Amino acid sequence: MHSFFRRLILTLAGNRLVTRFVSRYGMRLGARRFVAGEDWEQAVVQVKALNDSRMSTTLDYLGESVTDTGQARAARDTYLALLENIDASGVRASVSLKLTQMGLDISRELCLENVGAIVRKAADLGNFVRIDMEGSAYTQATIDIYRELRRDFDNVGLVIQAYLYRSEEDVRSLAALRPDLRLCKGAYLEPADVAFPRKVDVDENFKNLIALNLGQGGRTAVATHDEKIISWTEAYIRENRVPKELYEFQMLYGIRPALQRRLADAGHPVRIYVPFGTEWYPYFTRRLAERPANVLFFLGNLLRR
Ligand SMILES: Cc1cc2nc3c(=O)[nH]c(=O)nc-3n(C[C@H](O)[C@H](O)[C@H](O)COP(=O)(O)OP(=O)(O)OC[C@H]3O[C@@H](n4cnc5c(N)ncnc54)[C@H](O)[C@@H]3O)c2cc1C
């Protein structure tokens, strides 16, 4: 049922009329719950509030599937300015970005040049860049670019999705690099020949990947709001005496804030993913697709107007 719903929402989200309507009214009708603002000035207010509650953040300047070289370079420049702003303001924030925002659909060289400039700038400022993972068509290219960046830099991390069959092998093959990995379930529409269709299998694989990467000595960010996986991780960390430098919990801005606070209050390192910018539509529709109640909330706001 859940996967049918997800498929339906993500398919509808691709419709041109739906895109136009939601892009126009979505921020007022509910997207604000998941998106921290349309610019740095709005986002930094939320970052400071999270920092005050003992949580770090990772800022995502929203954007993906860029097909224009100028636009990809502009996104790079926004990230360079963002790193400067983070440094000048003193907030606890790293950055997360998507390779298709950096021009991966245009050329691998352009993408590598853009993301390389961002990672270099982050290194100069003592900051860190996380490369988000997109749909399975990009998995190999993303891992390849990550490997290439790791030749020169340590301040870059990758995301691995538990729903993909290939992920266990990917984590094993990266062992020598001691990768800093964010592990998550995976948010895209994937066919059954590349991804586990059943939630139980995804959850089982998630736990295996956490143990695998921690066992390999790789820093591991457990990115989920799933209390069962979080409790399992807490027990694993306790039993295996995993030091705080080697793990953190990550959650999305606006989702399960009480759980975020509980983990931070319990003394765990917690980082909140804070997206901002005007290109929030695809991010927002993925959040709607994850949970039927979110669509009802959105439609409820629409009807009340
Ligand atoms: C920090 C972070 C970074 C991420 N980066 C990536 C990435 O790079 N690539 C990628 O493919 N995916 C990414 N994701 C998304 C991830 O793959 C999942 O789609 C998403 O986290 C929902 O799954 P879940 O693990 O929370 O578990 P679920 O089993 O889906 O949810 C567990 C519980 O969390 C709550 N919840 C989950 N989603 C929502 C929601 N949208 N609205 C309200 N409540 C919700 C509900 O209470 C639900 O019962 C990221 C997630 C996080 C937290």
Image (tube, grey):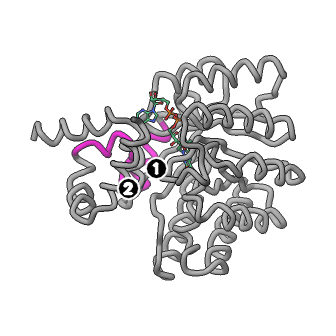
- Tag 1 residue: 275
- The amino acid type of the residue labelled 2 equals Trp
- Between residue 169 and residue 23, name the one nearer to us: 169
Image quadrant assignment for residue 36: top left
> Is 175 rendered above or below residue 265?
below
- Res 117 seen here: yes
Q: Are marks 2 and 1 in contact (CB under 8 Å)?
A: yes
- Tell me what residue is drawn at x 81 percent, y 42 percent: 218
- Tell me what residue is drawn at x 27 percent, y 42 percent: 30
> Where residue 233 sits: x, y (%)?
69, 25
- Tag 2 residue: 280
Q: Residues within 10 Å of mark 2 (few under 14, many from 20)?
A: many
In magenta stretch: residue 20: no
Q: Which quadrant would the N terminus be assigned to in this image? A: top left
Q: Which residues are magenta?
A: 29-48
- For this view, does 29 lie left or right of residue 181? left
Q: Which quadrant would the C terminus be assigned to in this image? A: top left
Residue 8 is tagged as: none
Image quadrant assignment for residue 250: top right
Distance from the alpha carbon under mark 2 to that under mark 1: 8 Å
Q: Earlier in the sequence, mark 2 or mark 1?
A: 1
